[in-house]
Image: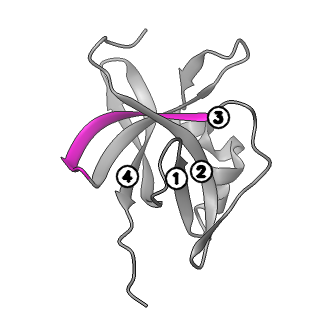
Amino acid sequence: MNPPSATFVFGRFVLAVRNALLMMASPPYPPIALEILREFSASEFIGKVYVRGRDREWVPVHADGATSYDWFKDAKTKKIAFDMENSSARWSVLYFRGENAGTGPYLAVAIRLEEKKSS
């Protein structure tokens, strides 16, 4: 169970292709939740990655188990973005890394709001 003060955002990891997001087939609910752990500004934060479990409950991703997810494998060679639900902004994934807290090890992600490039 998560503490009542936890803040989450929901969405999906997608391939970032030039100035567009390459969308995969979308499930009817967001497959990823990010618990905001450290906020450096309104446009950059580190979050704990959760996925839907078998009972559709949110479960944290263990850093060692991340290799079973396509979005994690893609991030090693391709640019990945986080398509945040209810946001038209594009969030770039800076990196994934394993972290550890009192609740045990988990996968963390750093994301940053992309600035729009002037044409």
- Checking the image for residue 50, the label placed there is none
Q: Residue furthest right?
A: 25
**CA neighbours of label 2 inside 10 A, class few (<14), some (14 to 19), many (20+):** many
Pick whichever of labels 1 and 2 is earlier in the sequence. 2
CB under 8 Å between discs 1 and 2: yes
- Residue drawn at x 31%, y 21% is 6
Q: Position of residue 106 (x, y in %)?
A: 45, 32
Question: Where does label 2 land, which residue?
Answer: 13
| Residue 9 lies in the magenta-colored region | no
- Checking the image for residue 82, the label placed there is 1
CB under 8 Å between discs 3 and 4: no
* In the image, residue 68 above or below residue 58: below
Q: Which residues are magenta?
A: 32-42
Q: CA distance from mark 3 to mark 4?
A: 18 Å
Q: Main secondary structure of the magenta part?
A: strand
Check disc 3 and give the amino acid type.
Answer: Pro
Q: CA distance from mark 4 to mark 2?
A: 12 Å
Q: Quadrant of the N terminus?
A: top left
Q: Identify the secondary structure beneath mark 2.
A: strand
Q: CA distance from mark 4 to mark 1?
A: 10 Å
Pick whichever of labels 3 and 4 is earlier in the sequence. 3
Check disc 4 and give the amino acid type.
Answer: Ala
- Residue drawn at x 58%, y 61% is 75
Q: Identify the secondary structure beneath mark 4.
A: strand
Q: CA distance from mark 1 to mark 3?
A: 11 Å
Pick whichever of labels 3 and 2 is earlier in the sequence. 2
Check disc 2 and give the amino acid type.
Answer: Phe
